[in-house]
Image (cartoon, rainbow, N blue to C red):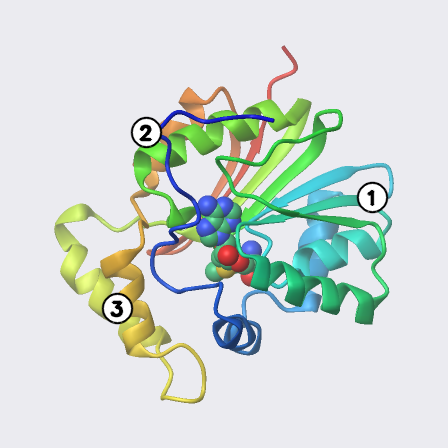
Amino acid sequence: MNSFPAWYFDESKMAGVDFEDVAQVEAYDRNQTVSTPEKEQALVNRLGISSRHTVIDLGAGTGTFAIQASLIGANVHAVDISQAMINYAQKKAKIFDATNIKFHQAGFLTYQHQDEPVDFVVTKNALHILPDFWKMIAFLRIAELLKPKGIFYLRDVIFSFPPVEYKSSIDEWIKQVAKPEGQGWTTQDFEMHVREEHSTFTWIVEEMLTRSGLKILEVTYLTPVYTEYLCMKPAS
Ligand SMILES: C[S@@+](CC[C@H](N)C(=O)[O-])C[C@H]1O[C@@H](n2cnc3c(N)ncnc32)[C@H](O)[C@@H]1O
């Protein structure tokens, strides 16, 4: 059994939304539009994941990506700190008949992989849960999970707007994406994200990725607040 120092981050104390609350888990699955089965299937294809590969999804949530990766035959490890999320994702996997997923209640900073290093590590909409120092530690751990030439895919709320424009950029984002009560994520949800969670700037994330030893192959600034990275662990 692994033990962590007394100063180690406590992943069970989640910032922002309480994903141990079953109602929040159900609302998450209902409200999310960026992680539909079709979109996640397209991502599985784009990354070139096949039945020869092993994939770790960190912060797997309700399991949409993990299920799609499993359905093409990949070996999938779905890792999430929330037992309520895992319970929900396991039920969904049964409905989709996605059998080759192992579920692990663990986090970016505590997951202990028991098998060989893997071909892909994926994390979407979850890394912002960690403060920046701990994001760096997460990247170091992700680099260790990957085999040489393994791929790391990251997508999250990561800010590419000029820092001096922080106020107008955040206000404009919330105005564009917030939905009326009962129809999706509300203004209050996005305000809480900025206030209580740990989304940061692209240039900080890029420096951290590079310092973890990963090579950034592609960056896509999808919007001024939403970014995706495709990285590779060098061969040696
Ligand atoms: C916004 S959801 C994203 C879920 C999924 N990846 C998606 O794209 O729909 C964030 C997930 O991260 C999980 N989470 C929170 N803190 C975590 C941590 N330290 N390690 C791993 N997962 C964590 C939450 O329980 C939640 O399921």
Q: Is residue 26 above or below residue 108?
A: below
Label 1: which secondary element:
loop
Give 95 or 236, whichever is nearer the viewer. Answer: 95
Q: Mark 3 to mark 2: distance in Å?
A: 29 Å
Q: Is residue 210 above or below residue 160?
A: above
Q: Residue at x 46, y 33 (%)?
A: 138
* Mark 3 lies within 8 Å of ligand 1 (Cβ measured): no
- The quarter of the picture where residue 130 lies is top left
Q: Is residue 91 left or right of residue 7?
A: right
Q: Is residue 88 above or below residue 178?
A: above
* Mark 1 lies within 8 Å of ligand 1 (Cβ measured): no
**Which amino acid, by three-letter code, is at mark 1?**
Ser
Q: Mark 3 to mark 1: distance in Å?
A: 39 Å
**Which amino acid, by three-letter code, is at mark 2?**
Trp
The single residue placed furthest to the top in the displayed view is 236
Asked if one can make out residue 30 in the rendered structure from this viewpoint, the answer is yes
**Which amino acid, by three-letter code, is at mark 3?**
Glu
Mark 2 or mark 1, which is nearer the start of the sequence? 2
Could you say where residue 43 lies in the image, as x and y percent from the top left? 67, 53
Residue with the mark numbered 3: 191
Q: Residue at x 52, y 27 (%)?
A: 141
Mark 1 or mark 3, which is nearer the start of the sequence? 1
* Disc number for residue 112: none
Residue with the mark numbered 1: 50
Label 2: which secondary element:
loop
Q: Residue at x 69, y 23 (%)?
A: 147
The quarter of the rendered structure image containing the C terminus is top right
Of the residues tagged 3 and 2, which is closer to the observer?
A: 2
Residue with the mark numbered 2: 7
Mark 2 or mark 3, which is nearer the start of the sequence? 2
Q: Mark 1 to mark 2: distance in Å?
A: 40 Å
Could you say where residue 105 lies in the image, as x and y percent from the top left? 60, 48
